[in-house]
Image (spheres, rainbow, N blue to C red):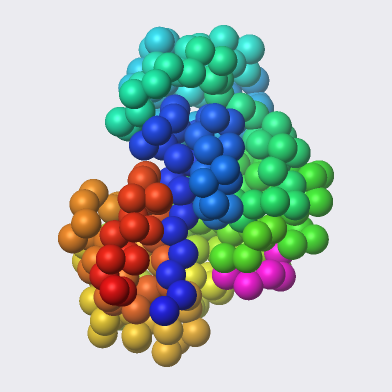
Amino acid sequence: MDFTLIAHRGYSFSAPENSFEAFDMALERGFDNFELDAQITKDGQLVVFHDQTVDRVTDGQGEVSDHTLKEIQALKLIGGYEFKEEFPDAYIPTMDEFLGRYAGRAHPHLELKSREAALPTMVAEALKRHGWLNVAGTDTFDAPGITVSSFWADQLYRSKLRLPNVRHGWLINELSEETVDASVKLGFDSVYPRAGTATLESVSHAYERGLTVRGWGIDNDDDLARIYKSGAAGTTINWPTEGQEFLDSMAD
């Protein structure tokens, strides 16, 4: 069974999340699908960053939107998941830097993280600027390729209107009749439930309605086994190498 592991914020178990070090590590270890997050700085620049504040993973404090790009990129990345090594040169990249660096060799799953109304338009313009729309028609996990996602249906819908040929996936807590109906109505291509809530029945129903399904929120082997057995096409994961080894052991 085809099942794609998407390196969550890059190889974030072993390198600072959403850094070039984490994305490069994912590629080097054979994972060319990776997830990243888009936010807007105080001076209107797109950066690759997850949290609303910089407190958790940098030596700074405060909202991302209260920092200029220069201030954001001066911060030291000091936290994240379980990486043990130090990466003194790691910094918060701009979306332009990211899209230029990985053009033609990866499939980013780009999450619209904030609810700022300008975000979908800014992301759409960046994708166009760097030629990513040329690979918008590839299969679900082909690299190069591009997918846009969000937990916010309104943000995702704004993006879909601007990028009608790009795959869009809605991040949700649980697959239900209502979320599947809404996804179809809004023209989304995919739906992404929390892995621990996926069932064979709910995933099959989504596929019957023409949606692709992949998971998120892998905390342990049980979550990974559940989303795999549900019939979903893949999932994000912080530790893709270990995850692939676990899936291989299940197949033996």
Q: In percent of the image, x 40 and y 51: which residue is there?
A: 240
- Decide which of 48, 22 is in the foreground and name it: 22
| Residue 195 appears in the rendering | no
Look at the image and tell me whether residue 21 can be seen: yes
Above or below: residue 100 compared with residue 217: above
Residue at the location (51% across, 56% down)? 149
Percent position (x, y) of residue 163? 69, 60
* Image location of residue 241, percent across then percent down: 40, 50
Instruction: Say if 102 sits above or below 168 in the image.
Output: above
Q: Which residue is drawn at 48% across and 70% down?
A: 190
* Quadrant of image for the C terminus: bottom left
Residue 137 falls inside the magenta stretch: yes
Q: Where residue 139 sits in the image (x, y, percent)?
A: 63, 72
Q: What stretch is highlighted in magenta?
A: 136-140
Q: Where is residue 145 in the image (x, y as percent from the top left)?
A: 66, 60
Front residue of 137 and 52: 137
- Quadrant showing the N terminus: bottom left
